[in-house]
Image: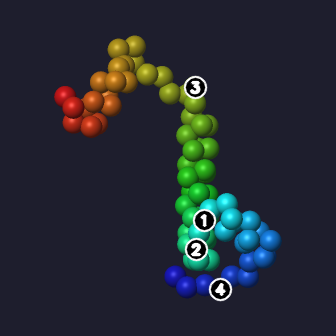
Amino acid sequence: MRTNLVLGWRARREAFRLTGARTKRELIDMALRELVRVRRKKDLMELAGRIRLRKDFERKGLLALRHGSR
């Protein structure tokens, strides 16, 4: 999707410096991905303490199954 944006030069300069992005498009894409990542992480943190695992839950076994080691 094409759109036009007017970005403040100070924020844009700082964002380019921090991210190493080479184009405005790359910079905006990075910013949107980071926003989504942070919001998803926040949503997961809100679940902390609300999920009860079975007493026989074995994290290492689950990871092995996920990666096909078993």
Select label 1 or label 4 by which is in front: 1
Residue placed furthest toward the top: 55
Residue corresponding to mark 3: 49
| Residue type beneath disc 3 | Gly
Q: CA distance from mark 1 to mark 2?
A: 6 Å
Mark identifier at residue 4:
4
Residue corresponding to mark 1: 20
Question: Residue at position x 27%, y 37% from top?
Answer: 67
Q: Residues within 10 Å of mark 2 (few under 14, many from 20)?
A: few
Select label 4 or label 3 by which is in front: 4
Front position in the image: 68 or 20: 20
Give the mark nearer the N terminus: 1 vs 3.
Answer: 1
Q: CA distance from mark 2 to mark 4?
A: 18 Å
Select label 2 or label 4 by which is in front: 2
Q: CA distance from mark 4 to mark 3?
A: 43 Å
Q: CA distance from mark 3 to mark 2?
A: 42 Å
Q: Tell me: 51 left or right of 46.
A: left
User: Are discs 1 and 2 less than 8 Å apart at CB?
Assistant: yes
Residue corresponding to mark 2: 22
Question: Residue at position x 67%, y 60% from top?
Answer: 18
User: Are discs 1 and 4 less than 8 Å apart at CB?
Assistant: no
| Residue type beneath disc 4 | Asn
Give the mark nearer the N terminus: 4 vs 3.
Answer: 4
Q: Find residue 49 and report its image quarter.
A: top right
Q: Is residue 15 above or below residue 62?
A: below
Q: CA distance from mark 1 to mark 4?
A: 22 Å
